[in-house]
């Protein structure tokens, strides 16, 4: 767990954000809301050992969804797209919009499955949840 904690801390060192020690010990799901960040995280175990998944959102940057293995190796997972491609062709633009929301809604479902149930207003809008 030390490599996981260090890898996470290095990513957010500029803001002095770390996973709370108690959560590292208990492997309890949690979130951090600090310095403009909303970071949700959960622990798990698979054939490669223990891991930490986190989803980080900040209004000044794109979201990131990351899987950190116990050896510190990082895998980037799908995150909400913040920019939608557009086209002057109305049919093409409609297709692009549908793809954008389809992708983001799939990501939102995956986040919910992990127990990541806190959404910023930007996450809510990017997933098209205001349209339902």
Image (cartoon, rainbow, N blue to C red):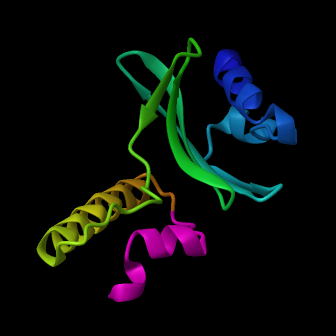
Q: Residue furthest left?
A: 91
85 lies left or right of 2 = left
In the picture shown, does residue 116 fall above or below 122?
A: above
In the picture shown, does residue 52 fall above or below 115?
A: above
**In the image, what residue occupies the spot 38% across and 44% down?**
78
Q: Could you say which is closer to the camera, residue 39 or residue 57?
A: 57
Q: Could you say which is closer to the camera, residue 108 or residue 102?
A: 102
* Residue 104: quarter of image: bottom left
**In the image, what residue occupies the spot 33% across and 61% down?**
85
* Residue 20: quarter of image: top right
* Residue 47: quarter of image: top left
Q: Position of residue 96 (x, y in %)?
A: 23, 64
**In the image, what residue occupies the spot 35% across and 87% down?**
131
Tally of numbered discs: 0
In the picture shown, does residue 35 fall above or below 27?
A: below
Residue 70 part of the magenta segment: no
Q: Quarter holding the N terminus?
A: top right
Q: Position of residue 52 (x, y in %)?
A: 55, 33
In the picture shown, does residue 68 fall above or below 129?
A: above
**In the image, what residue occupies the spot 77% across and 59% down?**
36
Q: Which residues are magenta?
A: 117-132
């Amino acid at each position: 767990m030390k490599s996981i904690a260090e890898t996470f801390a290095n990513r957010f060192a500029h803001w002095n954000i770390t996973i709370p020690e108690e959560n590292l010990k208990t492997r309890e799901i949690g979130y951090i809301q600090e310095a403009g960040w909303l970071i949700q995280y959960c622990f798990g175990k698979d054939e490669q050992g223990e891991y930490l998944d986190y989803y980080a959102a900040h209004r000044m940057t794109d979201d990131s969804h990351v899987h950190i293995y116990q050896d510190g190796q990082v895998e980037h997972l799908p995150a909400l797209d913040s920019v939608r491609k557009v086209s002057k062709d109305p049919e093409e633009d409609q297709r692009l919009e549908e793809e954008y929301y389809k992708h983001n809604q799939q990501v939102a479902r995956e986040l919910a499955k992990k127990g990541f149930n806190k959404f910023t207003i930007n996450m809510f809008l990017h997933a098209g949840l205001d349209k339902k």
